[in-house]
């Protein structure tokens, strides 16, 4: 990804959209997010910000910011899709797949249909991206 820090921020907003899709964020969803970032994303991410913090933790921070600002679900989805389309590189396939796993983990923590619809929308966007980049 051309800008890893911004990618994780966009992902944080998208995870928020999945979690809030049913009208409220459940403790189970928040826990799944924290555990996934810690065990999956941060473990694989090798870049740190200027303070030395692993950039994967921006997912958590941006999730909280989106919650405070009550970011509209559609805005979060569109923002993520625009960013990925503009900054995707072929080496990013594993990061995208891991991100989808995160969305699925959060959605399954407190399963609702609206959350699954958002994930399917994101998967559709990523399939569209694959057509143009031939992942």
Image (cartoon, helix red, strand yellow):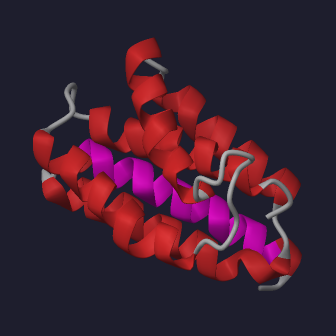
Residue 23 rendering spot, x and y as whole percentages: 22, 25
Residue at image x 55%, y 58%?
56
- Nearest to the observer: residue 26 or residue 75: 26
Instruction: Using the rendered image of the protein, determine whether residue 112 is visible from the camera's viewpoint.
Output: no
**Magenta segment includes 20:** no
Instruction: Using the rendered image of the protein, determine whether residue 104 is visible from the camera's viewpoint.
Output: yes
Q: Residue furthest top?
A: 69
Residue at image x 61%, y 42%?
9
Residue 111 rendering spot, x and y as whole percentages: 15, 54
Secondary structure mostly seen in magenta is helix
Q: Is residue 34 left or right of residue 113?
A: right
Q: Quadrant of the C terminus?
A: bottom right
Q: Answer with the quarter of the image where residue 19 lies.
A: top left
Q: Is residue 115 left or right of residue 71?
A: left
Residue 11 rendering spot, x and y as whole percentages: 55, 49
Residue at image x 19%, y 27%?
24
64 is higher (above) or lower (below) than 84: above
- Nearest to the observer: residue 126 or residue 48: 48
Q: Quadrant of the N terminus?
A: bottom right
Q: Answer with the quarter of the image where residue 44 lies.
A: bottom right
Q: Which residues are magenta?
A: 114-131
**Magenta segment includes 115:** yes
- Nearest to the observer: residue 48 or residue 39: 48
Residue at image x 58%, y 62%?
124
- Nearest to the observer: residue 34 or residue 88: 34
Residue 128 rendering spot, x and y as whole percentages: 72, 66
Q: Residue furthest front?
A: 51
């Amino acid at each position: 990804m051309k800008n890893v820090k911004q990618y994780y921020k966009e992902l944080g907003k998208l995870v928020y959209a999945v979690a809030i899709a049913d009208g409220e964020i459940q403790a189970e969803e928040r826990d799944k997010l924290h555990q996934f970032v810690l065990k999956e994303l941060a473990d694989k991410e090798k870049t740190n910000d200027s303070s030395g913090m692993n950039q994967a933790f921006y997912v958590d921070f941006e999730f909280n910011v989106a919650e405070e600002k009550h970011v509209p679900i559609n805005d979060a989805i569109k923002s993520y899709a625009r960013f990925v389309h503009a900054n995707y590189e072929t080496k990013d396939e594993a990061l995208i797949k891991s991100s989808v796993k995160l969305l699925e983990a959060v959605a399954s923590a407190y399963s609702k249909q609206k959350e699954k619809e958002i994930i399917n929308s994101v998967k559709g966007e990523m399939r569209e991206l694959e057509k143009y980049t031939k992942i």
